[in-house]
Image (tube, rainbow, N blue to C red):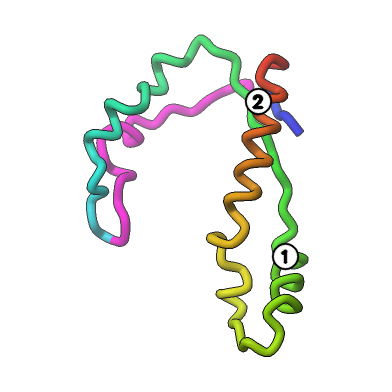
Amino acid sequence: MIIPLKEVVYDIRARDGTWCNHNGFTCMNFPKCLQRYPDFLSLKNFSWGAIIEEFDLEAWAESQREKHKGEGWSEKQLRNPRHWQKKVRARLMAKAIANSNRL
């Protein structure tokens, strides 16, 4: 699903390091990351949209529960994004590329 965005909110804190905080520690990539990615304001003349990929975490956890039956996995382990996020991200990227000319 693609959702056109009529307004994009820009917050200067996205570029000053305020959000580059990991459990109280400043990100080791800051400020190098600022050189890697353009300032969002330089992209303001583009059309923007959001691509949505639905993921059923309950069904995933249940399938993992069956797969790892008898191993004593906790709910946290069954739902760990490290096990499913890469696949969802790949589907999301494929949708974004397929819909990139629709905005």
Left-right relation of 22 to 60 = left
Q: Quadrant of the C terminus?
A: top right
Point 30% across, 51% down: residue: 21
Q: Please name the residue that numbered disc 1 is placed on.
A: 60
- Given residues 64 and 14, the one toward you in this image is 64
Q: Which mark is residue 92?
A: none
- Tell me where residue 71 appears, x and y as whole percent: 63, 87
* Marks 2/1: CA–CA distance: 25 Å
Residue span colored magenta:
5-23
Q: Earlier in the sequence, mark 2 or mark 1?
A: 1
Point 53% across, 25% down: residue: 8
Q: Quadrant of residue 37?
A: top left
- Tell me where residue 94 appears, x and y as whole percent: 67, 33
Left-right relation of 48 to 102 = left
Q: Amino acid at mark 1?
A: Trp
- Tell me where residue 12 appears, x and y as whole percent: 33, 30
Left-right relation of 58 to 74 = right
Answer above or below: position of 49 versus 47.
Answer: below
Point 24% across, 34% down: residue: 32
Q: Quadrant of the N terminus?
A: top right
Helix, strand, or loop for circle 2? Answer: helix
Q: Quadrant of residue 58?
A: bottom right
Q: Please name the residue that numbered disc 2 is placed on.
A: 97
Is residue 16 in the magenta section? Answer: yes
Q: Amino acid at mark 2?
A: Ile
